[in-house]
Amino acid sequence: MRKHVVPIQLLARISDVTSKEFQRHAIFTIAADKLDPQRVFNALRTDIKKLGDDAAYKLAWFRCGNFISVLISGTPAVTAYVFAFIAKGKQRKLFQCGEVVYEGVSTVKFKTEVDELLQEYAAPSVKHSFGGSC
């Protein structure tokens, strides 16, 4: 059985996102083929700003094989927006496909889903394999 090594910085970001500061959580994955993560997250940030001043969140992301997993904890408006962002991202051609893995209030379920996704994490030979914002 192969043990996965996850960078301490990524674990710190995930720990920050999974903290109990926010009661709602969401996870979505997007195909990483020909993907510019910076462009995707700039679009997400811009869209969330349009939700208003009450839209607060924490985000972390990491690469798993041929997809990117995005973790968000935030206000209900932000986590509910994930579904719309997947549709808009496809329309804008930010990514070819994506799906919501989890959206809800259970921190335990959120952490379980994150742990399952981390099993597929492998430090790829790219400039950025994970990131986030506070």
Image (spheres, helix red, strand yellow):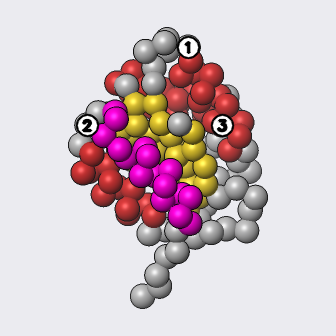
* Local secondary structure at mark 2: loop
Q: Which residue is mark 1?
A: 50
Q: Nearer the viewer, mark 3 or mark 2?
A: 2
Left or right: 26, with 120 as reference point? left
Camera-side residue: 58 or 40?
Answer: 58
Mark 3 is on which residue type?
A: Val
Mark 1 is on which residue type?
A: Lys
Please tell me which residue is depicted at 76% across the width and 58% down the height of the picture.
Answer: 127
Where is 131 relative to 9, above or below?
Answer: above
Nearest to N terminus: mark 2 or mark 1: 1
User: Label for residue 105?
Assistant: 2
Nearest to N terminus: mark 1 or mark 3: 3
Camera-side residue: 52 or 11?
Answer: 11
* Local secondary structure at mark 3: helix
Q: Position of residue 102 (x, y in %)?
A: 35, 44
Left or right: 27, with 91 as reference point? left
Please tell me which residue is depicted at 57% across the width and 39% down the height of the picture.
Answer: 133
Camera-side residue: 17 or 45?
Answer: 17
Image quadrant assignment for residue 63 = bottom right
Q: Is residue 21 magenta?
A: yes
Q: Is residue 98 magenta?
A: no
Q: Is residue 70 visible?
A: no
User: Label for residue 40?
Assistant: 3
The residues colored magenta run 7-22
* Local secondary structure at mark 1: loop
Left or right: 52, with 94 as reference point? left
Image quadrant assignment for residue 46 = top right
Q: Position of residue 132 (x, y in %)?
A: 57, 44
Please tell me which residue is depicted at 29% across the width and 33% down the height of the picture.
Answer: 23
Mark 2 is on which residue type?
A: Val
Please tell me which residue is depicted at 52% across the width and 74% down the height of the picture.
Answer: 5
Classified by dominant secondary structure, the portion drawn in magenta counts as helix
